[in-house]
Image (cartoon, rainbow, N blue to C red):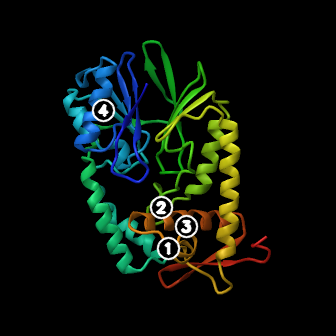
Amino acid sequence: MPISVPTPFYIGPVNVYLIPEDPVTLIDTGPKTKEAYEALREGLRQARVRITDIRRIVLTHTHEDHCGLAKQLRDEAKNAEVLVHQWETGHRAGRRLQHEEHRHLLVRAGVPEAEIAQMRRIYEGVQHLGDALAEDECAELKDDAELEFANGVMRVVHTPGHTPGSCSFVREADRTIIAGDCILKRVTPNPVLSPDPIDPTRRFRSLAEYLVSLARLRSFAPTLVYGGHGEPVTDFEELFNRYLRAIRERQAEVVRLVPQQGATAWEVARELFPDADDVHRFLAVSEAAAHLDYAQTENKLAVELSGEREVYRKLAGGDR
């Protein structure tokens, strides 16, 4: 059952999913705020579940609106098991060491130093919405593994794109899916700029991975998909085709915005989203970089280093 939990973010409430079968499981937790904690506790109370009944906390990904209360709930539930994919890093105790990796990627994307400093200040303001977890406080979610319950199982499906370690959970008996931010009914999920888990000096190719994840979820022919925000999706095929149209349209727009002399991801982002402010500037450059990477993969653009910055240029026929 879904529990709507408030967040301080523009996206609005996050959906936390309670599976009251043994072992009692939460999928995602909400951010670490008093309002979120009280809403979650009330949702559990209505289901006649106490926090101390929770035996397992499963995270779709580790953005603060989804994982912020994980450590607090783990401790209150007397060391409930916390499960997360190894490619997720936002929950880790050493996450502050990753600032330099992100800074490197932002420099490569052409973001000015003053903007990078502002993005860092905003992110440091968000970090208090979640407590870090030590390595020995988490267990690893593995692709294609099964989460066992008293009355069935859910299959773990690694669905990278929104983040490198995003996971979805499929109950194959009725073809329902809990998809976190991989699937949102009213918006296309943002491919957030992240270091590649294998080589952190490189940018994770989020959009290409996301398209594979969408196709993989489609292969289950889902009857109902529960997203991380908003209402559930009852017609996945319609949403799948709508997502593909939106991605194709954005891809064409991004390629069109690259001038003859070339442009960085930051310059394309400022053209795409001229009114973006605060955290939305980071999301804007994430979106631009993801589409530029994909356009390069599709041989519509070429990229070269100019100093520390990546500059994208059109190939012949690339704006078609």
The amino acid type, in three-letter code, at marker 4 is: Leu
User: Which residue has dot 2 on it?
Assistant: 193
For the residue marked with disc 1, what is the amino acid? Ala
User: x and y percent of residue 320 in the render?
Assistant: 79, 70
Q: Residue 17 falls in which quadrant of the image?
A: top left
| Image-based side of 318 in relation to 188, left or right | right
Q: Identify the residue under disc 3.
A: 289
> Contact (CB < 8 A) between labels 2 and 3?
yes
Q: Position of residue 126 (x, y in %)?
A: 30, 56
Q: CA distance from mark 1 to mark 3?
A: 7 Å
Instruction: Say above or below: 105 vs 96.
Output: below
Q: Which residue occupies 60% across, 44% down?
A: 213
Q: Are marks 1 and 3 in contact (CB under 8 Å)?
A: yes
Q: CA gap, disc 2 to disc 4?
A: 30 Å
Pick the front one: 178 or 3 = 3
Query: Alpha-carbon neighbours of circle 2 within 10 Å: few (<14), some, or many (≥20)?
Result: many
Sequence-wise, the earlier of marks 2 and 4 is 4
Real-space Cα separation, disc 1 to disc 2, in angstroms: 10 Å
Can residue 276 be seen from the camera position used here? yes
The residue depicted at 52 percent of the width and 75 percent of the height is 270
> At which x and y percent is residue 222?
63, 30
